[in-house]
Image: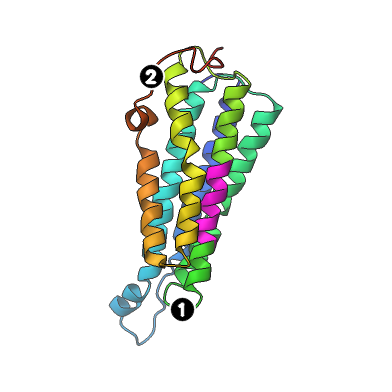
Amino acid sequence: MSSETSRIEAFSDGVFAIAITLLILEIKIPSVTQARLGRQLLQQWPSYVAFLMSFLFIGIMWINHHRLFTHIRRSDNGLLFLNLLLLLGVSAVPFPTAVLAAHATAPGLRTAAALYNGTYVVIAVFFNLLWRYAVSRGLLDRSSAEFGVSTSRQYMVGPLLYAICFGLVWVNVALSLALNVALAVYFAIPAQRVTGARSAHTQFPNAHS
């Protein structure tokens, strides 16, 4: 870990850890009543699904953040600010997750899904801004040419694809959420395997120390 980015990574890891831990708080302990425990547990299925989805999403975002900062070796004020914007989006995830779980079987499902998907549109934009700023300011190490090309290509489509998920909410909520999960899997795959990027410094001139 570069000493210049170590505090960024440590602080970011803490935010990711807190956000992913808060997700479980939406799953309530069944009350001691005459109702059967098994029935009460089954009735919380929307919370289980929302928890697993958001746990997956936050986990993959953490993986991608780690991948980026493996190659980002220097920082400046702009990078600090953009990283904070990204963490703002990450820390907000438990709220739309709770809203989606609460309204999964209610008339407000479409609005809840729009809020949920919209959150990931914003996060995708922040990820792009952070990465492209690091590239444009030459904050990467010298060995990052291939990684830089492939990651730029993979991230470029992120906001558009998440915006499509958001638009699908008004057509089919289940389909929009399924596509969101598919996108999470897509971004879990290392960019080099997805894009087949060519390693050439002439294509990525800012990848230097």
Most foreground residue, 106 or 102: 106
Q: Residue furthest bottom?
A: 34
Q: Nearer the viewer, residue 90 or 126?
A: 126
Which residue does the numbered mark 2 point to in the structure image? 198
Q: CA distance from mark 2 to mark 1?
A: 49 Å
Residue at horizontal 53%, vertical 16%? 207
In front: label 2 or label 1: 2
Q: Position of residue 5 (x, y in %)?
A: 58, 24
Q: Residue at x 42, y 78 (%)?
A: 31
Q: Is residue 128 above or below residue 136?
A: below
- Mark 2 or mark 1: which comes first in sequence? 1
In the picture shown, does residue 131 fall above or below 172? above
Residue 94 counted in the magenta span: no
Q: Which residues are magenta?
A: 115-125
Q: As shown in the figure, which amino acid type bears the numbered disc 2?
A: Arg
Residue 194 falls in image quadrant: top left
- Residue that lies at the very extreme toward the left in this rendered image: 38
